[in-house]
Amino acid sequence: MAYKILKKEEIAPSVHRMVIDAPDVAKAAKAGQFIILRIDERGERIPLTITDFEKETGTVTVVFQEMGKTTKQLAKLSAGESLEDFVGPLGTPADIRKLGTVILVGGGVGVAPIYPQAKAYTKEGNRVISIIGARNKDLLILEDEMGKASTELYIATDDGSKGHHGFVTDIMKRILDSGEKVSRVVIIGPPIMMKVGAGVASPYDVEILVSLNSIMVDGTGMCGGCRVTVDGKTKFTCVDGPEFDARKVDFIELMNRLAIYRGEETKAVEKYEE
Ligand code: FES
């Protein structure tokens, strides 16, 4: 079965949004879940978080950054072309319910998985304070969408070209310091940002969740590639996660494992570009 690409656009340099015709996935999808796609029969399987889905139209939106061989290939496809596989929804849905005030923090392409959560938390009647950031304003994604989906939206850029000059976690700390009762913080972004964010929020009386989508390989519980240590126990991100209690995640081990994968990925890209 082929899955048609209905729309494709570059929303920031090397970051693309694709809308796929996948009614079965759209019907069952929940915020926090992901899909696995394959461009063609011999293609590598890549997991991507579901950024948006519409049950009525049967469409699923994914956002990806050109990083490895397959994402570079994917970026070359256009609307009208098809994908061989688009399997999902996979993973445990985010635990979204009425809690009161929730802070959502998204960094870089981590804003893409934060977006469906903002929509879902708002739908459940929460006060949703979203903080999104990037290295500079050109790399900032989904600003309008996040503005609509949240009660309040804050922006931070590393170079100060838009919003707060500094980190998303600075704004998060300011809100936590303000004394406002916050029930939960959800942080999604590069592992280092999640580690720093978890460290900043830890002293406060608030639940902290991170989504470790970025480290999945096959997404089926078979390869072991997504292994993480949470609370001293081995967990598989693709089946046990991707959301975990940030205070219990061993981020150092996670970052070491990712560094190993990055080396492998660079080799594959070099081969692809030869
Ligand atoms: Fe392979 Fe989870 S991604 S076991």
Image: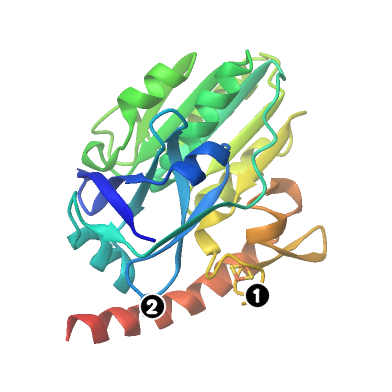
Query: In the image, which disc is placed on residue 222?
Result: 1
N-terminal-most mark, 2 or 1: 1
Which of the 4 image quadrants contains residue 71?
Answer: bottom left
- Percent position of residue 156, x then y: 37, 32
Q: In the picture provided, is 114 more to the left or to the right than 166?
A: right
Q: Quadrant of the N terminus?
A: bottom left
- Percent position of residue 73, x then y: 24, 68
Q: In the picture provided, is 257 more to the left or to the right than 248?
A: left
Which of the 4 image quadrants contains residue 224?
Answer: bottom right
Residue type, mark 2 in image = Glu
Report the residue at 53% width, 20% height from top.
Answer: 129
Viewer-proximal residue, 115 or 156?
115
248 in relation to 142, above or below: below
Q: In the picture provided, is 80 more to the left or to the right than 250?
A: left
Q: Nearer the viewer, mark 2 or mark 1?
A: 1
Q: Which residue is mark 2?
A: 265
Say whether residue 163 is visible: no
6 in relation to 38, above or below: above
Which of the 4 image quadrants contains residue 12?
Answer: top left
Residue type, mark 1 in image = Met
Ligand 1 within 8 angstroms of badge 2 C-beta = no
Ligand 1 within 8 angstroms of badge 1 C-beta = yes
Viewer-proximal residue, 87 or 219?
87
- Percent position of residue 231, x then y: 81, 57
Describe the element under mark 1 as helix, strand or loop.
Answer: loop
